Image: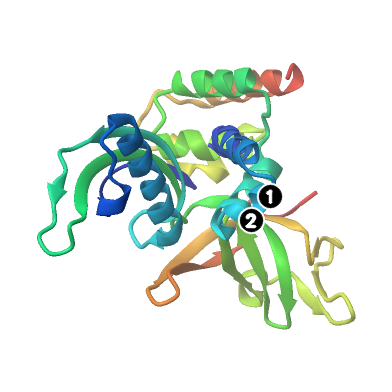
Amino acid sequence: MFLKVQLPWNVIISAENLDAKGLMLQRSIIIRLLDDFACKKATKDLGYFLAVTTLESIGEGKVRQHSGDVLFPVVFSGITFKLFRGEILDGVVHKVLKHGVFLRCGPVENVYLSNLKMAEYKYVPGENPVFLNEKLSKIGKDVTVRVMVIGTKWLEVERDFQALVSVEGDFLGPIS
Amino acid sequence: MNCEVSLILEHKYEQLQQMSDDPLNQVSQVFEKSLQYVKRFSRYKNPDAVRQVREILSRYQLAEFELCVLGNLCPETVEEAIAMVPSIKNRGRALDDEAIEKMLNDLSLIKRFE
């Protein structure tokens, strides 16, 4: 689910980029903020960082002792994406394996639907493997599936989330 | 909701397009995948429709996440809505089946006239 967050942040501007004109300063702060934001990718609490919507306030700059950079505390609003346990959402299958499939939900690639969580579906091997149930409903590559999140995990090293989902429930499963 | 995020991300993407010839190179993987996802899964494309959807859902004292899940998944029946967001039937709220049905009908009207 997409979240709207308000965050404090410290933007560091190096001395070369500081300009006497006030307008340029605000612009460099915004550009630096967007860069930092794009590099950060995701955090455990807020999820994946997508976009900055507004810059709420810029505090007074503090000069850092040894480097000569100036640190500006800012507060901004932005959009993030995070998966929650119990949430129901749509995903697209991008990999089919013998014991389950991997879906993509927004920026999260590692959303795993195990064959144990789609008991009615059987694996059908072949050049284009799929999972098929008795009513001939298919879960295969590029199929949209409505799933429920049963667990999430934050991987500190890769700065990525993993999720475990299920289709056991009313109104869950492939959507045409 | 996905449709609101879609408007925001598309606007950002257009801003980038105006600034450079190759916007896809400038955006992160996270942004690109999210943009693809919201464009594919937004039921309402028109900004006025999106605003109306939020307005209608806001009338029903829903928690923010309940509003989002309903706006994203667009259930067609009361049963489906309760399966998607079981909490709307909790805690003796003023949300009986009739109210839910009216809400879903209003939403589907917007989709029809978009």
Are the residues under badges 1 and 2 in a single subunit? yes
Farthest right residue?
A127
Colouring scheme applied when the structure was drawn: rainbow
Kind of residue at disc 2: Asn
Q: In the rendered view, does A171 fall on the left or right side of A79?
A: right
Find numbered disc 1 in the image and state the secondary structure of the residue it sits on.
Answer: loop
Q: Where residue A163 sits in the image (x, y, percent)?
A: 51, 67
Q: In the rendered view, does B39 fall on the left or right side of B62?
A: right
Residue A172 is drawn in which quadrant? bottom right
Residue at the image point whose x is 59% and y is 71% from the top: A112
State the residue position of label 2.
B25
State the residue position of label 1.
B22
Q: Is residue A9 above or below residue A165?
A: above
Residue B105 is drawn in which quadrant? top right
Residue at the image point whose x is 89% and y is 81% from the top: A126
Kind of residue at disc 1: Asp
Find numbered disc 2 in the image and state the secondary structure of the residue it sits on.
Answer: helix
Residue at the image point whose x is 36% and y is 48% from the top: A33
Residues marked 1 and 2 touching at CB (< 8 Å)? yes
Q: Is residue A159 above or below residue B110?
A: below
Let me know if residue A5 appears in the view.
no
Q: Quadrant of the C terminus of chain B?
A: top right
Q: Nearer the viewer, residue A110 or B91?
A: A110
Q: Where residue A130 sits in the image (x, y, percent)?
A: 81, 72
Let me know if residue A173 appears in the view.
yes
Q: CA distance from mark 1 to mark 2?
A: 6 Å
